[in-house]
Amino acid sequence: MTSKIKVDNINKVSDDSNIIKKCGTTTTIGSGASNPIVVDGSAVTLGRCGGTVALASGATQTGFGRTGTVDWQTTPKTGDFTAVNGEGYFVNTTSGAVIMTLPSGSAGAIVSIQDYNNTFDSNNFTVTPASGEKINGGTAGGILLITTEGQGLTFVYVDATVGWKTVQENDFTSGGTTKIIASVSGACNTLTQDGDFKVATFKGPGNFTVTQVSSTAPENTIGYMIVAGGGSGGSKGSSVSNFENGAGGGAGGFREGRNGPMGCYAASPLAADAPTNAVTLTVQAYPIVVGGGGSGSPSSGAKGSDSSFAGLTSAGGGRGGGPNASCTPGGSGGGEQNWGGGSSPLGNQPPVSPPQGKNGGAGAQTASASGGSGGGGGAGEAGVCASGNNAGRGGAGVPTAITGSALAYAGGGGGSSPGPAAGGPCGTGGAGGGNNPGGNGTTNRGGGGGGSGQNGSAGNGGNGGSGVVVIRYKFQ
């Protein structure tokens, strides 16, 4: 027969305190915090198959070793500190640089760090070993400077040869963010995609409506292009006896801005990188105005109309001069008729920075029906002045890939003269320039209309090309 001892409690003789106490389904072993319990044997089993062994809240363990992990301290470190073996730290360098000193190394010691607010790139984090120890086998006492945004590292002490070895390195991963959400309205206006960007193109009036902005503030400063309508070319008018031939129309004003780091496209030479003329989106509807080109006529012709977005305006191009009407200033100036006084009509009117256009070209000042007239100014070049019987060509426009494809905008219209010395070619975007009638500026490119000269009869100046507004923003 197997011997048994049946008791509910075992107490000490000295003070009658419990050594083993049975209370309901719970058995307590030990008699207080100051009384250690020693279990002596070649093998000790705690728990049962399928059971759980747990440390009480606040209790610690020793002698079991680590499993390659640390206990993360969730209060961020904002100043210099000394690390403790087995701990991980979130380090916040938002307000300034921080230095961490590693503990004295012992084989298997482990420490981890993590950039708390992704600011290691702006304020550095420095790791210093204990006196005479190494990091990654470097010079004894040599520091490790961490300057990568969002960096995380684990350090394990190996031996005196390599010291603390960095393992389990991680890079920055973006957190949950919101992006710009917007829509366009108005006939002929489109919203297309170019990689991670959306491009809103307005060929006519409408609204660009923002219903959500990005949680990453720099992404809300966007790219834009505003091109006004080009001015018409000058006409010969109804009188064939007058010496003055029609000059080229000035291109519509050209304004472009972008957030350089967020731009991701080849901008024109006139682009203003933020913060100059920056447009930062907020939740609202932005009215868009797209200027029409000036209409050529047998009489005066017309200046182009303005385009605008978000408080920025590009001015319509100046009309080209003729016998019935002088040239006018504008986004780019219209060219001067051949017997018009020798002036160069002003561009960039009203003045903005960077300039939205160039001056028109002067006429040849030849008191003859065959004298050449000046070319209209373009966004990238002044209209060329006429010389003798040779008319001036229109000033060149400027190229930009804001829509995803490189195109040139806002070229001036070519001037005119009759006969073999006909008007020179128009600038890029100004599709016409020459005789009876002048060619029209390209639609939605802001080109100036070509001038019209005498060749035995009168003729109209070309129409200016209409403008366009483009908005480019990051959506993913």
Image (cartoon, rainbow, N blue to C red):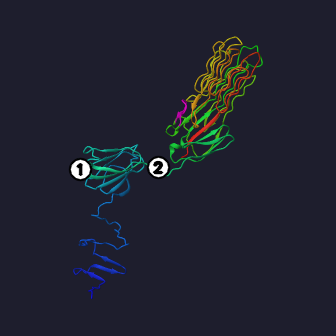
| Residue placed most toward the observer, 23 or 3 | 3
Identified by mark 1, the residue type is: Ala
Residue 429, located in which quarter of the rendered image?
top right
Please tell me whether residue 360 belongs to the stretch shown in magenta. no
Tell me the quarter of the image containing the N terminus. bottom left
Q: Left or right: where does residue 351 sit relative to residue 295?
A: left
The image quadrant that residue 54 belongs to is bottom left
Q: Secondary structure at mark 2?
A: loop
Q: Residue furthest bottom?
A: 1
Could you tell me the amino acid type at mark 2? Ser
Which image quadrant for residue 74? bottom left
Read off the residue under disc 2: 174
108 relative to 192 in the view: left or right: left
Q: Nearer the viewer, mark 1 or mark 2?
A: 1
Stretch of the chain drawn in magenta = 265-273
| Vertical placement of residue 54 versus 22, above or below | above
Q: Which label was assigned to residue 160?
A: 1
Instruction: Judge left or right: residue 66 versus residue 358.
Output: left
